[in-house]
Image (spheres, grey):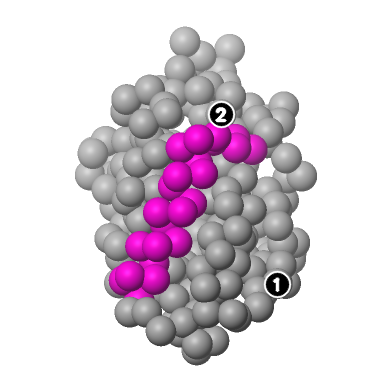
């Protein structure tokens, strides 16, 4: 009997694996509050999934008198501290990640957060849960540009000696419009699991309400790669 598995699964972090978006809102509000700048949920939602340099530029336009690197570092430090105290896993995400690991399906983490925040999540998981990790400082153009996912695919193919065409049998999991556009532009079958903001219907996008109850086989069915059952 055969089951179908994807060649690899590429995961967004904030809002997809872990519900850190409320942590980001609090960090943004605290930072802007130092300079008596108001910050709303609607403004925060507009930045969900964006590259951190783009967010930093927006805060500077609002009047935050900090260099971009210092601004980004301050936000990441606040979010990392809250995440370290309590990792808010999204429903079903950790179980699905564990199932993929047990089946030997390679996984990549593709996040616009910087390395120090990604490390908080990585430290909470078994070693080598992710074969490849791509963080915001590793790319010149962040999501919605396809560069982060293209880099992850390239590294996965190199590590597992796969042809580049193997990307057609890989699946990306995202929660935000910029992340979805990035994964689709990289040619990946993409599962959208909306969190803070809705996702519009797009060619190549499969929308799931939640990862709870979802399986590796359901991800594999999206790309249809048969493999022998172990």
Residue 213 in the image: state x and y as whole percent: 72, 27
Q: Is residue 9 visible?
A: no
Q: Is residue 114 above or below residue 230?
A: below
Dot 2: what SS? helix
Q: Which residue is mark 1?
A: 40
122 magenta-colored: no
- Residue in the foreground of this view, choosing between 186 and 4: 186
Q: Give whichever of 175, 172 is nearer the camera.
A: 175
Q: Residues within 10 Å of mark 1 (few under 14, many from 20)?
A: few
**Looking at the rendering, in which quadrant would you find the N terminus?**
top right
Q: Nearer the viewer, residue 196 or 133?
A: 196
The segment highlighted magenta reads 68-90
Count residues near mark 2 (Cα–Cα under 10 Å), then give few for <14, some for 14-19, many for 20+. some
Residue receiving disc 2: 94
Query: Which is nearer the N-term, disc 1 or disc 2?
Result: 1
Q: Does residue 179 lie above or below 98 as drawn?
A: below
Residue 62 vertical placement versus 42 (above, below): below
Residue 82 colored in magenta in the image: yes
x, y percent for residue 114:
35, 56
Dominant secondary structure, magenta = helix
Instruction: Kindly identify the residue that appears in the image at 33 percent across and 79 percent down.
Output: 67
Left or right placement of residue 203 versus residue 188 in this view: right
């Amino acid at each position: 009997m055969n089951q179908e598995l994807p060649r690899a699964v590429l995961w967004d972090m904030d809002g997809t694996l872990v519900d850190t978006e409320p942590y980001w809102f609090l960090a943004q509000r605290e930072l802007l509050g130092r300079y008596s700048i108001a910050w709303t949920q609607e403004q925060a939602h507009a930045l969900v999934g964006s590259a951190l340099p783009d967010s930093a530029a927006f805060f500077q336009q609002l009047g935050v008198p900090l260099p971009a690197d210092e601004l980004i570092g301050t936000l990441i430090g606040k979010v990392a501290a809250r995440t370290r105290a309590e990792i808010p896993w999204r429903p079903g995400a950790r179980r699905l990640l564990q199932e993929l690991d047990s089946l030997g399906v390679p996984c990549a983490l593709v996040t616009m957060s910087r390395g120090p925040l990604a490390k908080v999540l990585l430290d909470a998981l078994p070693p080598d849960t992710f074969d490849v990790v791509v963080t915001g400082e590793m790319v010149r153009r962040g999501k919605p540009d396809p560069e982060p996912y293209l880099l992850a695919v390239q590294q996965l193919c190199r590590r597992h000696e796969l042809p580049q065409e193997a990307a057609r049998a890989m699946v990306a999991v995202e929660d935000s419009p910029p992340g979805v556009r990035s994964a689709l532009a990289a040619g990946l079958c993409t599962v959208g699991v909306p969190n803070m903001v809705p996702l519009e219907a797009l060619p190549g996008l499969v929308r799931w309400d939640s990862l709870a109850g979802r399986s590796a086989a359901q991800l594999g069915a999206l790309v249809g790669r048969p493999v022998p059952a172990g």
